[in-house]
Amino acid sequence: MYSLSAYLPAQSIQQISEWLEQHNCNLKISNPRKTKLGDYRFVNNQHHITINNDLNKYAFLVTLTHEIAHMFVFEKYRNAVLPHGTEWKMTFQRLMLNFIPILPEDIQKSISHHIKNPKASTCSDPKLFSILSNYDDEKHLVVCEIEDNTRFFTVDGNAFERICKVRTRIKCRKIANNKLYLFNPNCKIVLNQ
């Protein structure tokens, strides 16, 4: 088991540790992945949760609680319910209520709104994602902060041009092949490669 003090707010460690130990969950803290912040799997009769190691303590707590909610729902329903259906939403909401009092005020307000109807990913809630990002050690430029017709690079080095906002996403054109993509507004980017 990892020393969770490097990853979580101190006041949350006891509760998180209890949940992981009670359910014999294998927690792996992984290098950052482009497509997800965390995940839950049940393999070989064992619960497995992985969380990216580059999250700030509050984002780590929200992401880990999200995945623990999947574990609880799996234990109760197995695969009989949708992954982010009503059962998961209610479980995630109940678990997060344990931590709202220990969160900074801006996160308290945003998470209280978020858990009324939680999304499948924290990244899918731009307001919550933005507030959590305020606590990152390093500040990152995100695609919603640049103007249309601006060229940028994703963290994997691909060049794009921002076209326009489309509802909750940002339409961008990949320079290499002229294909259009819809970006999460909080996708981390750099202007110079």
Image: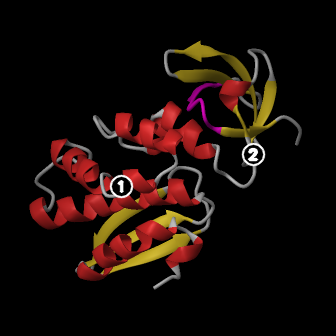
Residues tagged 1 and 2 counted as in contact (Cβ below 8 A): no
Say which residue appears at 15% left-offset and 58% top-offset. Answer: 79
| Circle 2: residue type | Lys
Q: Position of residue 14 (x, y in %)?
A: 38, 76
Which quadrant: the N terminus?
bottom left
Query: Measured along the vertical axis of the image, is residue 32 above or below residue 184?
Result: below
| Circle 1: residue type | His
Foreground pick, 103 / 181: 103
Please tell me which of labels 1 and 2 falls first in the chain.
1
- At label 2, counting other C-alpha atoms closer than 10 Å, the crowd grade (few under 14, some 14-19, many 20 or more) is few
Decide if residue 190 is on the left or right side of residue 68: right
In the structure shown, which secondary structural element does the residue marked by tag 1 occupy? helix
Say which residue appears at 58% left-offset and 57% top-offset. Answer: 33
Q: Which residues are magenta?
A: 179-187
Foreground pick, 141 / 131: 131
Q: Which residue is mark 2?
A: 139
User: Which label is found at residue 66?
Assistant: 1
Decide if residue 131 is on the left or right side of residue 41: right
Query: Measured along the vertical axis of the image, is residue 111 above or below residue 26?
Result: above
| Magenta highlight on residue 120 | no
- At label 1, counting other C-alpha atoms closer than 10 Å, the crowd grade (few under 14, some 14-19, many 20 or more) is many
Q: Position of residue 173 (x, y in %)?
A: 69, 23
